[in-house]
Image (tube, rainbow, N blue to C red):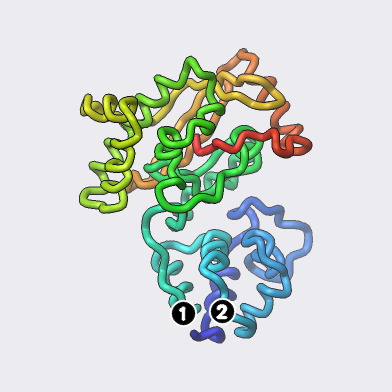
Amino acid sequence: MNLSELGVFLRSRRARITPAEVGLPAGPRRRVPGLRRDEVAQLAGASVDYYIELERGRGTQPSAQMLGALARALRLDHDERDHLYRLADRPPPATTGTSSHVQPAMLALLDRLDTTPARIITDLHETLAQNRLARALLGESPRRTGHAASFVYRWFTEPDVRTVYPEPDHPHHSKVLVHDLRAAVARRGKDPRTADMVARLLHTGPEFTDLWATGDVAVRRGDRKRVNHPTLGTLDIHCQNLFSEDGGQRLQFFTAPAGSPAVDQLRLLGVIGIQDLGEQAPTASGR
């Protein structure tokens, strides 16, 4: 483990990023060309003292979770992310699943969408990052690993997640999720993890089995959907997706049709955020 070199690398990456690039105000007085150490700590969810010690090449070996948070905060690309892990004597994470490295361009867009619910998900509908309004609309992303990190998998194995949508809409969501999954399976080729997920889903019952047997495929680029919210009631909104170049990640955002009641509902969502919702907030999230 080379903590000294790790500190040098962190300082060099911090210096190249402006506050505007990560959605922070520049402020009237800045004595450094890039981010301040306290700003990186804030973005990574670390204490300022801990981050300072890392830059000084001291302290303990950072966890894989902390390294992932630092990679996102500093907008590292894949090569830089892997280098960061190796300096900390940690194996670089897999390229799929919730440990996937969020592409910097995706994060840059997410940072700027502060007036609409938005999130970044994988092609298996695993949540990688989300903004405050997405958490307020759909709830905190559940901390799940393995197949259960995928909303598609939970949709067919955990009935409670379906409460995020009105029951009459469930057949539609089942159909489009399966069609989208088939496209992801083809895109991933001989990925054993995806193949195992499908094999397990084929044992969940006739709903998935019958839909899979149709052979239908369609990438889910956009949809009109109704979302149940514990305070605001049912929101009838548009859901759109912007895709990464390789199709493995998508930026998903929600907007209200012009002149619809959802315009005021989303405006109110921005006011109340997630305050006072407590355990009432939906936790199915993922879509």
Q: Is residue 116 visible?
A: no
Q: Which residue is painted at 64% across and 68% down in the image?
A: 33
Please state if 276 lies on the left or on the right of 63 as rendered: right
Q: Which residue is mark 2?
A: 61
Q: Secondary structure at mark 2?
A: loop
Q: Is residue 14 above or below residue 230?
A: below
Q: Residue 283 lies in what quarter of the image?
A: top right
Density class for disc 1 (Cα within 10 Å; few <14, some 14-19, many ≥20) is: some
Q: Is residue 141 visible?
A: yes
Amino acid type for the residue under numbered disc 2: Gln
Residue 55's disc is none
Foreground residue among 6 and 124: 124
> Quadrant of residue 274 in the image?
top right
Left or right for 24, reference 65: right
Q: Residue at x 49, y 45 (%)?
A: 127
- What kind of element bears circle 1? loop
Residue for point 30% across, 37% down: 203
First in residue order: circle 2 vs circle 1: 2
Which x, y percent locates residue 228? 60, 24
- Residue 66 location in percent, x, y? 57, 67
Q: Crowding near pointer 2: few (<14 within 10 Å), some, many (20+)?
A: some
Along the line of sight, the residue nearer the viewer: 119 or 171 = 171
Q: Which one is in front, 152 or 102?
A: 152
Whether pointer 2 and pointer 1 mark residues with C-beta atoms closer than 8 Å, the reply is yes
Percent position of residue 34, x then y: 63, 66
Residue under numbered circle 1: 89
- Residue 78: x, y in percent? 40, 63
Q: CA distance from mark 2 to mark 1?
A: 8 Å
The residue at the point 47 percent across, 51 percent down is 105
